[in-house]
């Protein structure tokens, strides 16, 4: 629960011993905030009350400040009675919060106002453990998002503007590459890389691209959509990533690239793939959609091959507030080709050198991603702590937990277990209020979208898809929620 404290109660929380008790109880159990509309009154009070000035500043720094929205209904009964209270209620409504107040008129006229006593009695309920609480994930960045939105409105640039340029520089630097091109989706990122190589004459229609058979289908769609041929190779059952040894058996005279997928957030073991690519003149195109920030031999994903495609789908480790993606590379020719292809084949306005498409990461998403990029490493560390807790404490013999070579090589986009009793386990966990998902229930070669692949026999892939189950994991998953997940898994008797 989120509570917005009106100015009267906030002032009492600083000055009054009894109210301080309320404040500490609320902040221990819930998230607390004040409306920006309250700050002038609060500031004026403590400007003239020096003994409490430092305490006021420390208290204010410990909670969030919620912006007052510009839309005002002057006919609202609360606005007529008390404009200050009405503005506080508007701020609270923007984040679905309740207002804690001792103002009787406020309590009478507003359906979101609550007394301090009632607020303190609202003990957080033990609800379900969400698979991924995106609202909570993004609320961490509330102030930064507000500032970013204001900057975009003031700039008047909404597509291919300064926010995108800044994000491209910052994400390229983060990955350790020279170039980054923001695009519309992660699927587009992979397609544009392949279209770029086709445009440059490095690939031709009908060439083959080796890809893991157990990937999300978008990887394979990108290859098929560009007139290339996906060659599905079995994964390693222990890592869920493509088995480098099996790549060799699938090479032909038409093979032009390997597309390793860092599935679930774990870096692919690339040493053997590097040797194969060098010996046969193949491009390495990373599908890094699930592995923002993961490291392999001291280098980040996005810089491990000739080019990489990222997704910024909201649920990713670095997620926008809608669809988005990017291409990273050190190849200048490929970068400029992709930059043109994403914009109708044009890098100079109304000068179209090639046939392109429309796939651009817009200013709003770029700005949001800049805010979140600053905390990506910290968020990944939070995921690693949860994964370590799971791996240490899940002891049920019916469950296979994921292995890991090195902590930095995995950013735990997903924590995927395996069990031969998946359906039974799902029902059991749902009964305990724990939400889980399957990534992915149907292997790509069994999808109707690729009928030509339906006859393939890929036993390792089929086993993985019949057994995998993803547990809740995110930077905002609480310790008590992780404990509930572990307890339920260990209680499961099949």
Image (spheres, rainbow, N blue to C red):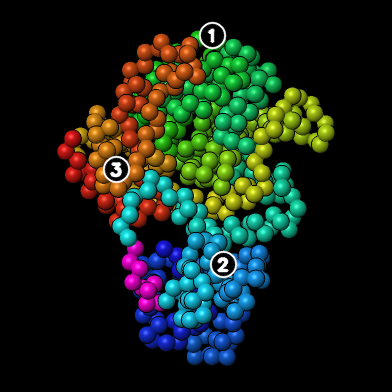
Query: Could you say whether the residue bearing mark 3 is in a helix, strand or loop?
Result: helix
Residue 430 disc label: 3
Q: Position of residue 128 (x, y in %)?
A: 33, 51
Q: Who comes first in sequence, dot 2 or dot 1?
A: 2
Q: Which residue is mark 2?
A: 91
Write down the region rendered in magenta. Answer: 116-124
User: Pointer 1: residues within 10 angstroms few (<14), some, or many (20+)?
Assistant: few
**Which residue is located at x 29 percent, y 43 percent?**
430
Quarter of the figure with the C terminus:
top left
How far apart in space, not on screen, are marks 2 and 1 (Cα)? 64 Å
Label 3 to label 2: alpha-carbon separation: 35 Å
Q: Earlier in the sequence, mark 3 or mark 2?
A: 2
The residue to which callout 1 is attached is 253
Specify few, some or many for label 2: CA neighbours under 10 Å numbering under 14, 14-19, or 20 or more: many
> In which quadrant of the rendered view does residue 346 lie?
top right
Q: Nearer the viewer, mark 2 or mark 1?
A: 2
Residue at horizontal 69 percent and vertical 21 percent from the top: 199
CB atoms of marks 3 and 2 within 8 Å: no
73 left or right of 128 in image: right
For label 2, the SS is helix
Spatial distance from mark 3 to mark 1, Cα to Cα? 50 Å
Residue placed furthest toward the right: 350
Q: Are marks 3 and 1 in contact (CB under 8 Å)?
A: no
Q: Does residue 117 belong to the magenta stretch?
A: yes
Q: Is residue 416 visible in this depiction of the protein?
A: yes
**In this rendering, position of residue 346 left or right of residue 176:** right
């Amino acid at each position: 629960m989120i509570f917005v404290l009106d100015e009267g109660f906030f002032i009492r929380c600083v000055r009054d011993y009894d109210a301080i008790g309320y404040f500490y109880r609320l902040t221990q159990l819930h998230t607390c905030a004040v409306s920006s509309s309250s700050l002038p009154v609060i500031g004026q009070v403590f400007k003239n009350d020096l003994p409490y000035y430092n305490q006021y500043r420390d208290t204010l720094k410990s909670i969030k400040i919620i912006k007052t929205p510009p839309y005002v209904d002057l006919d609202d009964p609360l606005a007529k009675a008390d404009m200050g209270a009405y503005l506080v209620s508007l701020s609270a409504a923007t984040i679905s919060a309740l207002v804690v107040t001792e103002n009787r008129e406020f309590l009478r006229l507003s359906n979101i106002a609550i007394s301090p006593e009632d607020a303190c009695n609202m003990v957080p309920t033990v609800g379900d453990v969400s698979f991924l609480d995106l609202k909570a994930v993004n609320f961490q960045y509330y102030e930064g998002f507000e500032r970013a939105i204001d900057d975009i409105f003031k700039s008047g640039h909404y597509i291919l503007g300064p926010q995108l340029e800044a994000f491209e520089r910052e994400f390229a630097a983060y990955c350790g590459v020279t170039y980054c091109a923001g695009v519309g989706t992660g699927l587009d990122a992979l397609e544009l890389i392949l279209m770029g190589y086709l445009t440059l004459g490095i690939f031709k229609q009908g060439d083959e691209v080796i890809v893991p058979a157990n990937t999300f289908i978008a990887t394979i769609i990108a290859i098929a959509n560009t007139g290339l041929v996906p060659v599905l190779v079995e994964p390693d059952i222990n890592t869920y990533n493509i088995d480098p040894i099996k790549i060799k058996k699938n090479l032909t005279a038409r093979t032009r690239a390997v597309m390793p997928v860092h599935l679930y957030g774990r870096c692919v073991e690339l040493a053997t793939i590097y040797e194969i690519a060098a010996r046969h003149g193949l491009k390495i195109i990373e599908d890094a959609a699930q592995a923002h920030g993961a490291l392999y031999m001291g280098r980040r994903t996005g810089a491990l091959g000739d080019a990489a495609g990222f997704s910024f789908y909201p649920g990713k480790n670095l997620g926008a507030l809608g669809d988005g993606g990017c291409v990273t590379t050190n190849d200048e020719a490929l970068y400029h080709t992709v930059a043109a292809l994403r914009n109708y084949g044009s890098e100079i306005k109304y000068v179209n050198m090639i046939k392109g498409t429309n796939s651009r990461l817009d200013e709003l998403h770029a700005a949001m991603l800049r805010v979140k990029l600053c905390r990506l490493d910290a968020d990944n560390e939070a995921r690693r702590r949860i994964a370590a807790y799971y791996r240490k404490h899940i002891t049920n013999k019916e469950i296979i937990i994921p292995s890991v070579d090195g902590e930095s090589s995995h950013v735990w986009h997903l924590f995927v277990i395996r069990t031969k009793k998946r359906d039974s386990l799902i029902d059991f966990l749902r009964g305990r209020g724990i939400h889980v998902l399957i990534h992915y229930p149907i292997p790509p070669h069994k999808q109707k979208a690729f009928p030509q692949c339906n006859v393939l026999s890929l036993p390792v892939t089929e086993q993985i898809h019949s057994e995998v189950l993803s547990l809740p994991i995110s930077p905002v998953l609480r310790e008590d929620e992780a404990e509930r997940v572990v307890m339920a898994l260990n209680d499961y008797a099949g």
